[in-house]
Image (cartoon, helix red, strand yellow):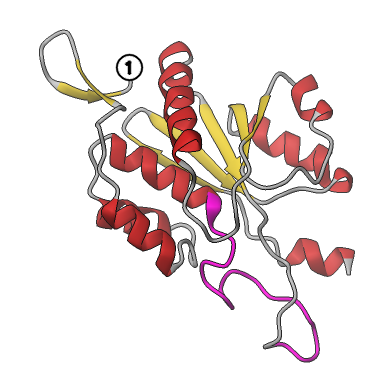
């Protein structure tokens, strides 16, 4: 099952908008952690946010100079207010202090038990879209807080990550009222992203 599990993990996708860069990635195992860390380094990730329960040792990632933050919340649910606030504070700090950096975020991403496949009892986000889409929700919130409409943020992410978002999360994003915490005026008085 180990080989099949790795084949069904979705590829990491980079979401870049204005001066923000995110990497939505899979949840590694201790066995795949070295390869996972190399991928993070390739994208110049300086912070990794885990929004699921820890399933691997974070020490090897931190040894490579990547901060690991644990903010788990329930599968398929919108994030709690405190996590949203912490997430936006983190983005403000990181994108100001280290322009061009990338922040990775992951939740549990395939494989998981799949009743629709009799021969191989595994499924992917395509089989049950939005089953574990916690990471894309945080990225969508960042896009919305930087001025993007929620519909555009959802479409922007879904172009690269099929199956992102379930109906509960879409409703949450639709009703979310941004405070423009990732928008600022530059020295000329023009609106801009975190700078």
User: Which residue range is magenta in the image?
Assistant: 117-134
Instruction: Using the rendered image of the protein, determine whether residue 159 is visible from the camera's viewpoint.
Output: no
On the picture, is 102 further left or further right than 180?
right
Percent from the top left, x then y, of residue 10? 63, 60
Rate crowding at label 1 as few (under 14), some (14 to 19) or many (20 or more) other CA atoms within 10 Å.
Answer: some
Q: Is residue 69 above or below residue 35?
A: above
On the picture, is 93 further left or further right than 74?
left
Percent from the top left, x then y, of residue 192? 22, 24
Percent from the top left, x then y, of residue 20? 40, 31
Q: Is residue 113 above or below residue 110?
A: below
Dot 1 falls on a residue whose secondary structure is loop
Q: Is residue 16 above or below residue 73?
A: above
User: Residue lying furthest left in this view?
Assistant: 189
Residue at image x 46%, y 44%?
A: 138
Instruction: Using the rendered image of the protein, determine whether residue 101 is visible from the camera's viewpoint.
Output: yes
Is residue 133 one of those drawn in magenta? yes
User: Residue lying furthest top in this view?
Assistant: 187
Q: Which residue is mark 1?
A: 195
């Amino acid at each position: 099952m180990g080989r099949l599990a790795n084949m069904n993990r979705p590829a990491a996708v980079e979401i870049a908008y204005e001066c923000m860069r995110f990497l939505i990635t899979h949840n590694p195992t201790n066995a795949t952690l070295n390869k996972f860390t190399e991928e993070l380094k390739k994208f110049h990730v300086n912070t990794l946010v885990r929004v699921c329960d820890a399933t691997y040792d974070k020490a090897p990632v931190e040894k490579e100079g990547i901060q690991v933050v644990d903010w788990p919340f329930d599968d398929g649910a919108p994030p709690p207010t405190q996590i949203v606030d912490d997430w936006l504070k983190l983005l403000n700090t990181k994108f100001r202090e280290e322009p061009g950096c990338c922040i990775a975020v992951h939740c549990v991403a395939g494989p998981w038990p799949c009743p629709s496949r009799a021969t191989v009892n595994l499924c992917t986000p395509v089989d049950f879209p939005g089953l574990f889409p916690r990471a894309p929700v945080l990225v969508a919130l960042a896009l919305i807080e930087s001025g993007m409409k929620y519909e555009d943020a959802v479409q922007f992410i879904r172009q690269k990550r099929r199956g992102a978002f379930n109906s509960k999360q879409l409703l949450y994003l639709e009703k979310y009222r941004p405070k423009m915490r990732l928008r600022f005026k530059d020295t000329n008085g023009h609106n801009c992203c975190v700078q």
